[in-house]
């Protein structure tokens, strides 16, 4: 099973910017590794929420499309809200 995620780069950084993204139905994310600079991203919340429910998503190599450029990544870590069904943040590691 292959997964393809659509993301865009994030310009506004920080706690307030991340909070505004979550209220707008988006998830802040970071992709790092492979000797490249870390990049801050934005993903759609519902897509990520339902993908994280799939067990294969956590162990697969994913195709992450960042502003038209495809990179292969794995899920490194993610954070969920303590009692809401909300993804707070997700980290990806380049393969």
Image (spheres, rainbow, N blue to C red):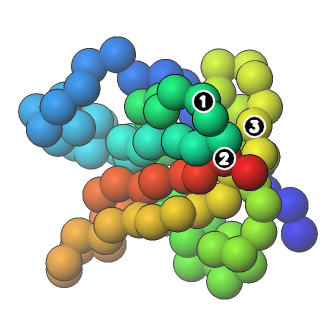
Tags 2 and 3 in contact by the CB under 8 Å rule? Answer: yes
Write down the quadrant of residue 62 in the picture. bottom right
Q: Which mark is residue 75?
A: none
Nearer-N-terminus badge (1/2): 1
Q: Quadrant of the N terminus?
A: bottom right
Tags 1 and 2 in contact by the CB under 8 Å rule? Answer: yes
Q: Measured from the top left, where is residue 40 in percent x and y?
A: 42, 31
Above/below status of 30 relative to 57? above
What residue does disc 3 label? 71
What's the residue at 13%, 38% (across, down)? 15
What's the residue at 65%, 19% (across, down)? 67
What residue does disc 2 label? 94
What residue does disc 1 label? 36
Mark 2: secondary structure = strand
Q: Measured from the top left, where is residue 90 in percent x and y?
A: 43, 55
Q: Residue furthest top?
A: 11
């Amino acid at each position: 099973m292959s997964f393809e995620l659509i993301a865009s780069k994030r310009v506004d950084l920080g706690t307030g910017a991340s909070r505004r993204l979550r209220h707008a139905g988006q998830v802040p994310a970071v992709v790092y590794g492979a000797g490249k600079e870390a990049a801050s991203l934005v993903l759609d919340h519902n897509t990520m929420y339902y993908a994280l429910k799939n067990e294969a998503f956590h162990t697969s190599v994913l195709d992450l499309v960042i502003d038209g450029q495809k990179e292969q990544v794995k899920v490194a870590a993610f954070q969920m809200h303590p009692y809401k069904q909300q993804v707070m943040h997700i980290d990806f590691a380049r393969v």
